[in-house]
Image (tube, rainbow, N blue to C red):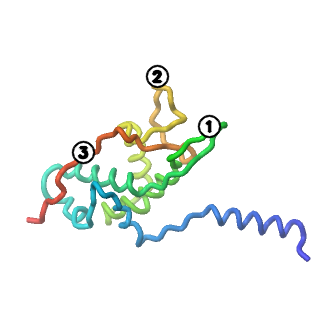
Amino acid sequence: MKTFSSMRNSIRNSVRNSFKTKVSKTSSIELTKSDTFMILQEDINNLQYGQFKAIRKFSIILNLFKNGISKKTYKILFKKYENVFSGKDALDLLSNHILPIIEPNGVNFKLKASKLIVYFLKEQFLLSPSNNSSINRTYTYSDTDIYYINENYMIPELSLDYKCS
């Protein structure tokens, strides 16, 4: 017969394990599922050639992020927010799946991803429903905050078909 404390501990462990998400590294390139803007591995490989390298890299990162983030419904203080994601989800997607594809030799992806999220907030590609005041707008990133993608944001569309010369 199991004791109460052993039952409680087994329930706690099963609940903790149910919240852990396991994403394999091989599924990272599968983030390119958009019908309107398809990003190929060849486009990523050709980032070092041609003009407007930074804008093309930024456009690829935005599209991979927009198509790859999993959106959920959150309830905070009696308000229901749909199609939002947590800061932790955004950081994990950028640092584990998008940035290693763009810069395979890079280091410290978590720091770069957090800076990139702050830049997304400044550019208003990402918005936070909890930070509605436009008077005192702060651009800080938090794992616990929730964010949503601004659908009115215009992602720069440049030709990505620069070939190696």
Image mark for residue 135: 2
Q: Which residue occupies 27% across, 55% down?
A: 37
Give how far across and how far down residue 95 sits, in percent.
43, 58
If the image is split into quadrants, where does the N terminus sit?
Answer: bottom right
The vertical placement of 109 against 119, above or below, is below
Q: Is residue 108 left or right of residue 11?
A: left
Report how far apart the C-alphas of labels 1 and 2 lie in the structure.
Answer: 22 Å
- Residue found farthest to the front: 35
SS of the residue under disc 2:
loop
Q: Is residue 156 left or right of residue 151?
A: left
- Residue found farthest to the bottom: 1
**Closer-to-camera residue (38/101):** 38
Asked if disc 1 and disc 2 are in contact, CB closer than 8 Å, the reply is no
Give how far across and how far down residue 7 sits, in percent.
83, 68
Q: Which residue occupies 47% across, 52% down?
A: 90
In front: label 2 or label 3: 3
Q: How many marks?
A: 3
The mark nearer the N terminus, 2 or 3, is 2
Residue type at mark 2: give it. Ile
Name the residue tied to disc 1: 79
In front: label 1 or label 2: 1
SS of the residue under disc 3:
loop
The mark nearer the N terminus, 1 or 2, is 1
Name the residue tied to disc 3: 156
Asked if disc 2 and disc 3 are in contact, CB closer than 8 Å, the reply is no
Residue type at mark 3: give it. Pro
- Residue found farthest to the left: 165
In front: label 1 or label 3: 1
The mark nearer the N terminus, 1 or 3, is 1
SS of the residue under disc 1:
strand
Report how far apart the C-alphas of labels 1 and 3 lie in the structure.
Answer: 33 Å
Residue type at mark 1: give it. Lys
